[in-house]
Image (cartoon, helix red, strand yellow):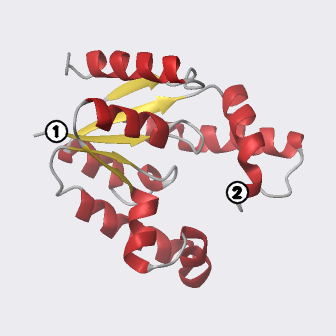
Amino acid sequence: MIRIFLIGYMGAGKTTLGKAFAKKYNLSFVDLDWYIEERFHKTVQELFAERGEDGFRELERNMLHEVADFENVIISTGGGAPCFFDNMDFMNKSGITVFLNVKAEILFQRLRVAKQQRPILKGKSDDELSSFIVSALQNRASFYNQAQYIFNADELEDYHQIENSVIHLSKLIGLE
């Protein structure tokens, strides 16, 4: 039975690497944010607006516990999920945790392109975006670094890099 939790900041490549890894090892893939949206028929942003951050984080924790019962799965968490309640400890006890560590400059490049699709980033200047990323990484580091494995996910820009990352990750966690 395999259960892997991918954690890291938005834009770290949790979904990209998670899907590729799941495909190679014939695992199910669950993106926790997508799972929540499917269950509640609302976007994460809508749920956040309706329930506030505390309400959303409680919901997120409950859904994390639900998907943690799945077997032969790789789960991509939301960037903030590890930072609330006992979520990090729970994930460490429930499966393998991998922090996708990406340099702030690379996150900036990835998120700069996608900021219109991410309401929390929309309207930020380049300087504001860069500062926002650096600050968030500093605030979340103590949670992210509790992962059992830390994986450098700087190189996920094309098919070849993704395939290489899948191989490296599988070796890191002992699947190969």
Question: Horizontal placement of 172 versus 139: left or right?
Answer: left
Which mark is on residue 2? 1
User: Which one is in front, 176 or 64?
Assistant: 176
Q: Residue at x 37, y 23 (%)?
A: 166
Dot 2 amino acid type: Gln
| Percent x, y of residue 125 | 89, 47
What is the quadrant of residue 165 in the picture?
top left
- Is disc 2 placed on a helix, strand or loop? helix
Residue at 46 percent across and 52 percent down: it is 83
Kind of element beneath mark 1: loop
What x and y, as percent, mark residue 96? 25, 36
Q: Is residue 47 above or below residue 123?
A: below
Q: Quadrant of residue 117?
A: bottom right
Q: Residue at the spot x=43%, y=15% of the render?
A: 164
Please name the amino acid that badge 1 sits on.
Answer: Ile
Vertical position of residue 162 compared to residue 74: above or below? above
- Tell me the tag on residue 117: 2
- What is the CA distance from the residue labelled 2 to the residue labelled 1? 32 Å
Percent across and percent down for residue 85 are 38, 60
Which quadrant is the N terminus positioned in?
Answer: top left
Q: In the image, residue 133 lies at what x, y percent?
A: 70, 41
Please determine whether, in this image, residue 13 is positioned above or below residue 68. above
Seen in the image, is 169 located left or right of residue 110?
left
